[in-house]
Image (spheres, coloured by chain):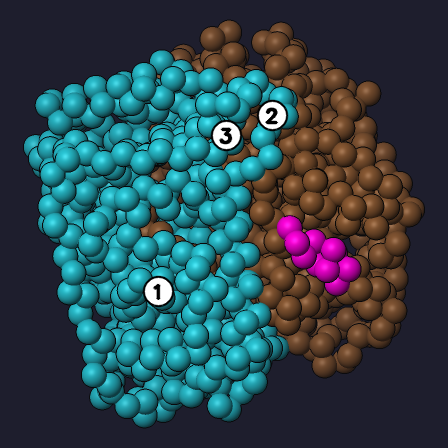
Chain colours: A brown, B cyan
């Protein structure tokens, strides 16, 4: 099935990276948004006596049912010295549950062509997947088993944990650009839950025990923390009845999830240099704390970030790629959670042009902060965001993710339906206000570089006080977070 | 590849899935009906200049996906200009005699559209995703670059840097990308499939403006393109726009056929790569038939049975039970000419690659000798059905499927027949496919691991150089 492809640009780099703490489901990577014409499809929402929230969205274009759900309290509930517990819990939910062993569970899911994926974000455990519509009864059975009756059996635990450790090493061997954000968040947020590596580190995973996982599930899972959204070729009446039967016996969780406190923005600039001897490129990340999911200037912010680093002709990509040929791509994004997540800029360039690329990057940020936006640019951005959003709200799985997102953040459907009209009203005064408020100054940034330290150490020092570590170190920060 | 990985083939894997209608709601979980709706919504025409236009109207969202499949890829290259098809793809956005470099993107984005493009061994695909209001503009832009492309020497130099950066990202700073390139290059002695699509470094640095001009004249004929539109557009409207903007482009002599065929391989080849690696890689590539081979569906199902998911055979054996690999994938790399099937393993730190290879061989010998079970075959069919329907849920996925079937199999209508084709695959067919593909004399084995001197322990300082 594979056709080797080399693309014009990596869409992952340039896609709207607007997902908040709940992102993790590919379909949910773009938050729920819409053009003036996009309406939330008719849906049914109900809450069982034990607190489980269910949303059903009939959409019958293809014979599939997609699901997207969350359990509040993700990596933020990890023991401080053991990041990765929530992620292991998520990964083990389908490795033995209910009457099925790990093998039997995988056979049941894949035997009918289904998918089941679970993961941990900072604020939630998420589950998502899809089944052929004819397998709806099996879907409900498997989902309820995975959430309510996972086995966390000892051999499965250790085998899965050990493999996760190896995957981090493998990523270091083959894809440093994908890791730079983990180092970046750790450097920016420190001990705040947004700073912890949600998938754990080689070191932390090695310290986690089966007991940690069992304890996390017992303390943090429960019907009242959970929302499940089903979208697709479904019969709402049948689903409600079957889900009620399957989930009514689930107890409430023992406590409410911890509340996050906002992390402060950083002042001044500092540099984390991660040494990858022999690397031929430097992969860089520059960030500061941004804004949260309820940020009132959201439509204006999306328009400004589209212009700055959110599309192919963005200011960043124009400078670093189109005009200079320094990089294959450059982009920026805001992650907006319950509390402000990070604004970050990402790119890479060959080792010898590291300083040139960083200087250009900082210049673009200075320019953005100081120069007024041209009216023509605002119009172009508006047309672009309005023109592209329907493509992110096309499928049942898009809608399952979007409605789960609304539920998680307590946002009404106006967050989707009002977005298009709001975009059409944004003016230059608003874009100026969000640019001043949400984008950091070039002087206030955490700078993270993965590259050949022997060759870029001096360059790195031009951008702030440098802390250095090795890519091969088993943590994502110079010292374990206390 | 690890779950963190972009992977060396991240860009775009076109999935030609098995297509099984699940109209059998409530029936047991076995594939039943095989009808895919929509054939009556697809219309096609061939312009006077030979360009075929295929339209699938789907008014679910107010957008259109427009894909121009140009029948040229790195298989059309020769030594000295490897990577040129891909570089050319980049240059298609960089100016015409009517429009300055960058105007293509600026105009499209200002009307709400986005775009991308990708190049493989076989084809180059230009993709636009637009609100329907931008249709006229997009036809104008596509026509302009097919008719009036021009090359600015300064832009060529800058774009050269972009492409080299892409190569550093995916190949030179990636063990997975590096080993795949080495195995592919080693597997062929004659056929241009040996060239990496991104190009060898010296060629990336050496292309000239004349190379680009020749490549354009030779390959970018309208009669060498297939245009696919899916979305909020009627066939009448799309055909009218195609006639207005694209039909005036004159037909040209078709590009020369790729003459070289790969001679039969008569013994195993091995390639070793010494690069710092915490997790060694073992890739095995087997010579396989072309995409349109009647055994294609059976080979695809075989690959899925071997490594498609946690319940697959090789995953169970090598990852879960023996714990001698952390990840395994298997895929049939379909092309116009006979190509490769890959089995790719990521090994844990400190693994003994010889032991892993032995276990893999034993597992493949077993499937060649005894075939697969009914349960395995049903699972693979259901997985393809599910992927297929997922793809049909988007205008993007439909455009990919229509183009794939038209270009690789000669007729987009086969998309609608393929459920029946896959449904008919039997255990005997899979057994035959296994015997065809898994021949040791036809394989290339690649192993990437740290050089012997390198410290093996995690956290130890690594040597200062990579080859």
Instruction: Report the span colored magenta.
Output: A351-360
Q: Which numbered tag is attached to residue A87?
A: 2
Q: Is residue B87 left or right of residue B27?
A: right
Compared to A440, does B377 lie above or below? Answer: above
Residue B87 x/y as whole percent: 44, 67
Residue B230 x/y as whole percent: 37, 68
Which residue is the site of mark 3?
Answer: B277
Residue B233 x/y as whole percent: 40, 75
Q: Chain of mark 3?
A: B
Judging from the image, what secondary structure is the residue with disc 1 in? Answer: loop
Q: Are marks 1 and 3 on the same chain?
A: yes
Quadrant in the rendering for residue B282: top left
Q: Residues within 10 Å of mark 1 (few under 14, many from 20)?
A: some
B216 is within the stretch colored magenta: no
* Pick the front one: A240 or A128: A128
Residue B202 x/y as whole percent: 44, 59
Q: Chain of mark 1?
A: B
Q: Are marks 2 and 1 on the same chain?
A: no
Compared to A325, does A45 lie above or below? Answer: above
Mark pair 1, 3: CA separation:
31 Å
**Number of the front mark, 1 or 3:** 1
Q: Residue at x 28, y 69 (%)?
A: B71
């Amino acid at each position: 099935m594979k056709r080797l492809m080399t693309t014009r640009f990596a869409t992952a780099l340039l896609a709207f990276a607007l997902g908040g703490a709940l992102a993790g489901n590919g379909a949910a990577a773009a938050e729920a948004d819409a053009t003036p014409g996009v309406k939330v499809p008719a849906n049914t929402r109900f809450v069982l006596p034990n607190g489980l929230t269910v949303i059903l969205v009939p959409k019958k274009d293809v014979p599939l049912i997609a699901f997207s759900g969350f359990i509040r309290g993700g990596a933020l509930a990890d023991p401080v010295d053991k990041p990765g517990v929530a992620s292991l819990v998520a990964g083990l939910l389908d490795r033995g549950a209910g009457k099925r062993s790990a093998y039997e569970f995988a056979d049941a899911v894949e035997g009918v062509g289904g998918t089941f994926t679970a993961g941990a974000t900072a604020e939630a455990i998420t589950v998502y997947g899809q089944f052929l519509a004819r397998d709806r009864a099996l879907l409900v059975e498997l989902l309820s088993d995975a959430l309510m009756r996972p086995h966390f059996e000892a051999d499965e635990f250790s085998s899965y944990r050990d493999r996760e450790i190896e995957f981090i090493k493998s990523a270091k061997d083959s894809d440093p650009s994908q890791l730079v954000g983990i180092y970046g968040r750790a450097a920016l947020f420190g001990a705040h839950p947004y700073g912890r590596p949600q998938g754990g580190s080689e070191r932390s995973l090695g310290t986690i025990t089966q007991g940690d996982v069992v304890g996390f599930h017992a303390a943090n899972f429960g019907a009242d923390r959970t929302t499940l959204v089903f979208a697709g070729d479904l019969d709402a009446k049948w689903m409600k009845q079957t889900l009620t039967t399957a989930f009514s016996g689930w107890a409430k969780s023992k406590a409410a999830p911890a509340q996050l406190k906002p992390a402060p923005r950083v002042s001044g600039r500092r540099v984390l240099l991660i040494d990858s001897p022999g690397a031929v490129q430097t992969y860089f990340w520059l960030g500061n704390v941004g804004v949260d999911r309820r940020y009132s200037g959201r439509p204006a912010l999306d328009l400004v970030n589209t212009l700055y680093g959110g599309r192919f002709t963005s200011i960043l990509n124009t400078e670093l790629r189109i005009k200079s040929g320094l990089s294959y791509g450059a982009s920026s994004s805001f992650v907006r959670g319950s509390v402000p997540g990070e604004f970050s800029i990402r790119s890479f360039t060959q080792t010898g042009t590291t300083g040139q690329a960083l200087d250009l990057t900082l210049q673009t940020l200075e320019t953005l902060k100081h120069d007024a936006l041209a009216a023509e640019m605002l119009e172009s951005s508006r047309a672009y965001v309005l023109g592209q959003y329907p493509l992110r709200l096309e499928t049942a799985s898009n809608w399952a993710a979007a409605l789960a997102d609304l539920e998680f953040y307590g946002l009404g459907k106006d967050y989707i339906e009002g977005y298009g009209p709001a975009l059409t009203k944004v003016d230059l005064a608003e874009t100026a206000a969000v640019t001043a408020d949400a984008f950091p100054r070039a002087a206030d940034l955490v700078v993270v570089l993965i590259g050949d330290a022997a060759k870029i150490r001096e360059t790195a020092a031009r951008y702030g006080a440098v802390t250095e570590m090795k890519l091969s170190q088993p943590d994502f920060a110079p010292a374990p977070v206390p | 590849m690890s779950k963190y990985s972009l992977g060396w083939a991240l860009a775009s894997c076109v999935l030609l899935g098995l297509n099984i209608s699940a109209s059998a709601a409530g029936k047991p979980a076995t594939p039943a009906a095989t009808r895919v709706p929509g054939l009556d919504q697809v219309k096609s025409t061939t312009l006077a200049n030979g360009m075929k236009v295929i339209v699938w109207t789907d008014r679910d969202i107010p957008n259109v996906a427009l894909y121009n499949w140009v029948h040229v890829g790195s298989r059309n290259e020769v030594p000295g200009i490897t990577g040129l098809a891909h570089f050319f793809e980049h240059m298609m956005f960089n100016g015409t005699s009517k429009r300055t470099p960058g105007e293509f993107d600026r105009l499209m984005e200002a009307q709400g559209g986005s775009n991308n493009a990708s190049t493989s061994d076989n084809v180059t695909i230009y993709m636009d995703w637009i609100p329907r209001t931008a249709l006229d503009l997009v036809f104008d832009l596509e026509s302009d670059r097919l008719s009036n492309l021009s090359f600015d020497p300064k832009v060529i130099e800058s774009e050269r840097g972009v492409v080299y950066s892409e190569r550093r990202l995916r190949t030179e700073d990636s063990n997975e990308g590096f080993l795949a390139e080495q195995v592919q290059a080693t597997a062929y002695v004659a056929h241009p499939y040996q060239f990496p699509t991104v190009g060898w470094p010296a060629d990336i640095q050496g292309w000239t403006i004349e190379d680009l001009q020749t490549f354009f004249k030779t390959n970018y004929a309208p009669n060498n393109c297939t245009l696919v539109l899916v979305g909020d557009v009627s066939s009448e409207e799309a055909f009218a726009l195609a006639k207005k903007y694209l039909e005036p482009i004159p037909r040209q002599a078709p590009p020369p056929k790729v003459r070289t065929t790969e001679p039969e391989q008569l013994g195993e080849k091995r390639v070793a790569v010494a690069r710092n690696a915490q997790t060694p890689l073992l890739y095995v590539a087997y010579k396989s038939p072309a995409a349109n081979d009647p055994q294609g569906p059976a080979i695809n199902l075989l690959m899925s049975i071997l490594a498609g998911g946690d319940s697959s055979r090789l995953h169970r054996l090598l990852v879960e039970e023996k714990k001698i690999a952390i990840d395994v994938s298997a895929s049939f790399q379909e092309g116009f000419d006979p190509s490769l099937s890959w089995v790719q393993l990521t090994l844990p730190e400190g693994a003994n690659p010889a032991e892993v290879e032995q276990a893999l061989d034993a597992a493949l010998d077993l499937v060649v000798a005894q075939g697969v079970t009914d349960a395995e075959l049903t699972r693979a069919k259901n997985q393809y059905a599910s992927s297929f329907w997922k793809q049909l849920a988007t205008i993007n996925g439909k455009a990919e499927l229509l183009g794939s079937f038209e270009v690789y199999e000669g007729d987009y209508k086969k998309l609608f027949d393929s459920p029946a084709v896959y449904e008919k695959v039997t255990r005997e067919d899979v057994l035959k496919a296994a015997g065809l593909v898994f021949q040791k004399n036809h394989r290339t084995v690649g192993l990437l691991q740290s050089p012997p001197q390198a410290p093996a322990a995690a956290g130890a300082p690594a040597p200062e150089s990579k080859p």
